[in-house]
């Protein structure tokens, strides 16, 4: 299926540490997106990486994509308590289907 | 200004009732979606509309009927509510740029069926 699967399911770190979350998927993709969901809120788009890109940065976020391994990682550097949230990856196919398919996410807890 | 808004935020109702959830986006997007997030946090697509036309209809009971009066609105009507319908329902929108569809989500409607 197109669904991304995030790993680990839960991650607890101290403020200031880096957090790494992984995503694996099974089909070929056009792009892969990462979203954040704070408790009780909707998902917020973080970053989109295209299939011909290997790495992308946005502020404290770094995303990598390895299409040969069908995997992606999201690194949050110098984490803050406000980064506490669930993080979801969404691989997207090339054409036609616009809807995203999400896994159950990685629940990140940043301890102050 | 809220980009994607949903009403109500919370909905508690009895089994067998009929209820509606409303969604509006002011982003000028041409595609809107309804997703269902269950208790295990899996988020699944239910419907997608593009310019008021249904383009995705996943395996959803026909008790669920989406309606799009215009491309800025996508409502979800649910007949004969069941316990298993309890979940958080999210509306989202996107603009197809051909380079990937970043989606903008509403705050969600938490539906509890008693």
Image (spheres, coloured by chain):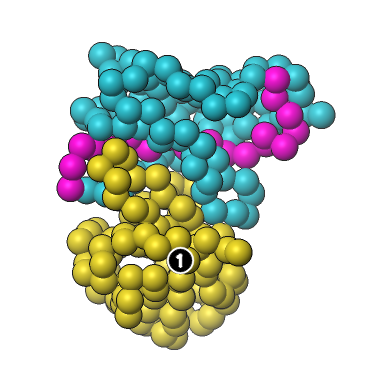
Residue B2 falls in image quadrant: bottom right
Residue at 31% in and 61% down: B30
Front residue of B72/A111: it is: B72
Q: Is A85 positioned to the left or the right of A4 in the image?
A: right
Residue at 26% in and 14% down: A68
Magenta residues, start to end: A78-96
Q: Which residue is mark 1?
A: B25
Residue B60 falls in image quadrant: bottom left
Q: In the image, is residue B38 above or below residue B50? A: above
Q: Is B36 positioned to the left or the right of A112 in the image?
A: left
The location of residue A34, given as percent across then percent down, is: 46, 35
Front residue of B53/A103: it is: B53
Residue at 17% in and 48% down: A96
The location of residue B6, given as percent across then percent down, is: 52, 69
Tell me, yes or no, whether the highlighted magenta stretch contains residue A84: yes
Viewer can see residue B36: no
Q: Quadrant of the C terminus of chain A?
A: top right
């Amino acid at each position: 299926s197109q669904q991304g699967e995030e790993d680990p399911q839960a991650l607890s770190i101290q403020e200031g540490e880096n957090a790494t979350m992984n995503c694996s998927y099974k089909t070929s993709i056009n792009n892969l997106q990462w979203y954040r969901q704070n408790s009780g809120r909707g998902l917020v788009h973080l970053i989109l990486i295209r299939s011909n890109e290997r790495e992308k940065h946005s502020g404290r976020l770094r995303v990598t994509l390895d299409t040969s391994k069908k995997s992606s990682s999201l690194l949050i550097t110098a984490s803050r308590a406000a980064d506490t949230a669930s993080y979801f990856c969404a691989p997207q196919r090339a054409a036609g289907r616009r809807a995203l398919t999400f896994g159950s996410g990685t629940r990140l807890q940043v301890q102050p | 200004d809220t980009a994607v808004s949903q009403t109500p935020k919370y909905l508690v109702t009895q089994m067998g009732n009929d209820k509606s959830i409303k969604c509006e986006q002011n982003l000028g997007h041409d595609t809107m979606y309804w997703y269902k997030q269950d208790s295990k946090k899996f988020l699944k697509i239910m419907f997608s509309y593009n310019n008021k036309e249904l383009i995705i209809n996943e395996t959803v009971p026909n008790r669920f009927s989406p309606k799009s009066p215009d491309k800025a609105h996508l409502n979800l009507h649910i007949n004969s509510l069941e316990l298993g319908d309890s979940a958080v329902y999210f509306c989202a929108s996107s603009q197809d740029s051909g380079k990937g569809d970043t989606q903008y989500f509403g705050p969600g409607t938490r539906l509890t069926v008693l």
